[in-house]
Amino acid sequence: MLVTYYNGQFGLSLRHPATWRTEQAEQDGVWYRYFLGPPAGPKNNPAVSATLLVGKLNGSLDEYAQVYLAGNTLASSKPEERQGATGHSYLFTSPDGGTRHSLLLLEEEGRVYGLYAQGETPLFERHYAVLEEMTKSLTLERPATYPERRNDDFGFSLRLPPSWKESRRFSGGGTLLLQFTSPPLAADKDRQTVHASLTLTVEPLSAAATLDSFYDGSRQKLGESFLVLKHGPWQKGYVDVLRTETPVAVSNVKRFYQVEGRRGYSLAFEARDDVYHRVARWYDVIASTFKTIPEGAKP
């Protein structure tokens, strides 16, 4: 079962097995995130490992690749592209054939992004399908490349990652509700996956309504079960971080509010408390793409 790791600092996402252990480090200006496979052998060392890396690119990408390729036997290489960033992927082995490696390197604006995997040859071959899927899943999360969802009837546009899928839609009486579900972010012991959600609501307002009256009315509808942890400005509106608790789970919500003409807009991102921090910056990235369209504006 694969879940999605998101890094807001560098705008990266990667799918990896939910059971793999992860660690993080930084050395000589290069950031690393390690994904460690299941234990194997008498010493219970990871069967294979995959390392996500980000660093400043001094020189060419080919020169950077030689740090890994030098002294090894190259089996194959091919050009790669992710969200406009270009590079290469490689498969290679140690001189004695005992260890196999894969490497993906991408270049964007003077920075290198990569995924390096290795393991003893039999173990690498056993886990190769997973390692290949991890490599294919590496995504540079650039909001400008997200598909645009524009709705002229309700006066807004929003860009969403392709990995976030629409799961619910309702409209009537001048109101629109759209719900989107994130890719799996974690998995419980019973193998149930944990997701984040985005609920976008558009509702009609009276001619006398203001941002503050819309915000106050929305807060009253939520009720006392939603505790406001933080409140602040956002674009032409407000943003709240809230916490809500049920007998089953504790969830955090990041809720954005905006008014345009006689419509009120809210974007509510929600995730279980233990995964919220993993994607909180993703919420900000998605929300930054939200735009209202004044009534009567041409598409």
Image (cartoon, helix red, strand yellow):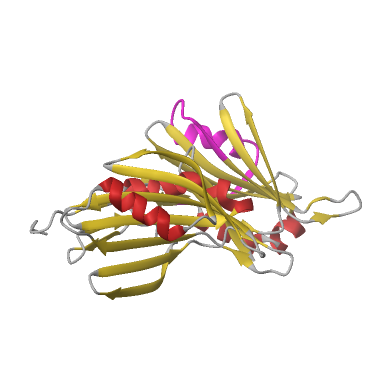
Residue 269 image offset from top left, x and y in percent: 45, 55
Q: Residue furthest right?
A: 42
Q: Could you say where residue 7 lies in the image, as x and y percent from the top left?
A: 52, 44
Q: Is residue 277 magenta?
A: no
Foreground residue among 169 and 233: 233
Left or right, residue 223 beside residue 153: right
**Point 35% across, 55% down: residue:** 217
Q: Which residues are magenta?
A: 53-78
Residue 150, image x, y percentages: 23, 61
Asked if residue 232 is positioned above or below residue 77 in the image, the reply reads above
Where's residue 30, x and y in %? 57, 30
Residue 76 visible within the image: no
Residue 101 is left or right of residue 142, and the answer is right
Q: Is residue 164 visible?
A: yes
Residue 233, located in which quarter of the rendered image? top left
Kindly identify the residue that appears in the image at 52 percent across and 55 percent down: 224
Position above or below: 12 against 110: below
